[in-house]
Image: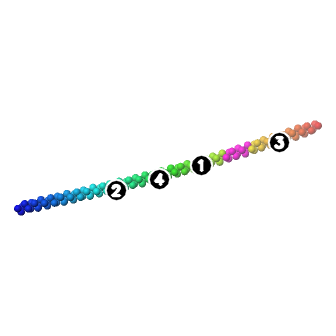
């Protein structure tokens, strides 16, 4: 009878030890799985945040570059337009001045020639009278 009790106690102890070991292993596995899941989630969130930040920075840089290029092009076009207008105005003024000077010179020459011819004719005509 003592042997049966000892065997029963040993079996109970072995079963309890096996159950405790299995429970510890299950708890360790669950903890490891939870830690791995948390680490993966944290890594995914960090990577997502980094990607979003990089995309935002790239978009901002592209927008700034485009705005700067547009402003530079607009300023360059405005400068070219102003220069062209100034050159055209200067050319028109110079042409008008040259034409006026030429017309005045031609009129003066014609008047002088007419006066000289009239004087010569009058002097010649009255010289014979």
Which of discs 3 and 1 lies nearer the camera? The answer is 1
Above or below for 14 versus 110: below
Above or below for 115 versus 45: above
Asked whether the residues under the numbered discs 1 and 4 touch, taking CB atoms below 8 Å apart as contact, a structural biologist would say: no
Residue 9: x %, y % from top left: 11, 61
For marks 3 and 1, the one nearer the N-term is 1
Query: What's the magenta region?
Result: 89-99
Q: Nearer the viewer, residue 42 or 90?
A: 42
The residue drawn where x is 67% and y is 46% is 89
- Left or right of 34 on screen, residue 116: right
Which of discs 3 and 2 lies nearer the camera? The answer is 2
- Left or right of 43 on screen, residue 20: left
The disc label shown at residue 29, or none: none
Q: Which residue is mark 2?
A: 42
Which of discs 4 and 3 lies nearer the camera? The answer is 4
Q: Which residue is mark 3?
A: 112
Q: Which residue is mark 1?
A: 78
Split into 4 quadrants, where in the image is the N terminus?
A: bottom left
């Amino acid at each position: 009878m003592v042997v049966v009790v000892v065997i029963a106690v040993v079996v109970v102890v072995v079963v309890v030890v096996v159950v405790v070991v299995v429970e510890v292993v299950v708890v360790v596995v669950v903890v490891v799985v939870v830690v791995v899941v948390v680490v993966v989630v944290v890594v995914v969130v960090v990577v997502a945040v980094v990607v979003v930040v990089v995309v935002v920075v790239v978009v901002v840089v592209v927008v700034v570059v485009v705005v700067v290029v547009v402003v530079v092009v607009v300023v360059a076009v405005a400068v070219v337009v102003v220069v062209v207008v100034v050159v055209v105005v200067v050319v028109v003024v110079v042409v008008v001045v040259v034409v006026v000077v030429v017309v005045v010179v031609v009129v003066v020459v014609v008047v002088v020639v007419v006066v000289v011819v009239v004087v010569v004719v009058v002097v010649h005509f009255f010289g014979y009278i």
